[in-house]
Amino acid sequence: MIKDLYDVSGKVAVVTGSSRGIGKAIALALAEGGADIVVNYNRSDEQADAVKKDIEAMGRKCITVRGNVGNFQQAQAIGKAALTHFGKVDILINNAGVNRDRTIRRMTPEQWNEVIETNLSSCFNCTKAVLESMLEQGEGVIVSVSSIIGEMGNPGQANYASTKAGIMGFTKSLAKELARNNIRVNAIAPGFVETDMLSTVPKDIREQIKKDIALGRFGSPEEVALAVLFLCSPAAKWITGITLRMNGGHYI
């Protein structure tokens, strides 16, 4: 019975930014849980195809759809591709994100806007792309990936922090709007996770960050993915409007 509570068999999940990092781990976890997957990506065909092969090796169906989710029309095309191929979308994971770190004094309007569009506007864009399908079937799950930075801020990341805090507010409002339609909306706010983004941080700064984490280590993409799987599963069917914080005790 416990195992069945985490079963998402028969579901179709769109995972944005899922050719690598946390998005890839989420796509693989949902596939292992039984879902068919739409892998969205914006750069590497090779990486996306590799994720597709891993998912199909589990016996799941998968398509890859290239597109910039920060662009409204491209996001709609991604949703249309998912619905054309699978006939429905049960789960949307708003994961795509970038960082363009600069102090406000040095940050350009282009760096501000790119992060806002990719990280936050994409949540609106992709929700609009699949929402009618969820409303018609009378159920659905939306999970958006926020960050500890949205809670605590960080020098040089005003654009990034704004988007991640915005995701929390978006989640609460959307959860209130859609609860009557049996559509659950939640967010997850990871702390520092071993990804390509973290690898660009100088080693001495990474070590200092690690000292501030109560559990003494960074998280893994797979740990974040398991939490997302939980939020998408029947085990979380009475959970909506929350931001699940997982950061190893970094922000207590």
Image (cartoon, rainbow, N blue to C red):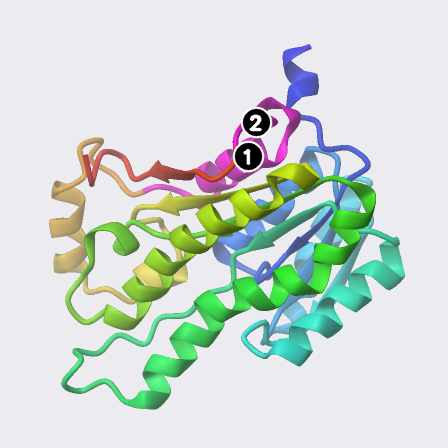
Q: Nearer the viewer, residue 57 or 60?
A: 60
Q: Residue at x 17, y 32 (%)?
A: 214
> Along the polypeptide, which appears first: circle 2 or circle 1?
1
Q: Looking at the image, how many numbered discs can be counted on the residues?
A: 2
Residue 75 in picture, x, y percent from top left: 66, 72
Residue at position x 18%, y 39% in the image: 213
Q: Which residue is mark 1?
A: 231
Is residue 89 visible in this depiction of the protein? no
CA–CA distance in space, label 2 to label 1: 5 Å
Measuring from the top left, give residue 123's x and y in whole percent: 53, 62
Q: Position of residue 251 (x, y in %)?
A: 20, 40
Q: Main secondary structure of the magenta part?
A: helix
Q: Is residue 104 visible?
A: yes
Quadrant in the rendering for residue 53: bottom right
Secondary element at image label 2: helix
Circle 1 sits in a helix, a strand or a loop, which is it? helix
Residue marked by disc 2? 236
The residue segment tinted magenta is 219-239
Establish if 36 lies above or below 97. above
Does 221 appear in magenta? yes
Quadrant for the C terminus in the image: top left
Q: Residues within 10 Å of mark 2 (few under 14, many from 20)?
A: some
**Measured along the vertical axis of the image, is residue 196 above or below residue 227?**
below
- Label placed on residue 6: none
The kind of residue tagged 2 is: Ala
Q: Quadrant of residue 230?
A: top right
Q: Are marks 2 and 1 in contact (CB under 8 Å)?
A: yes
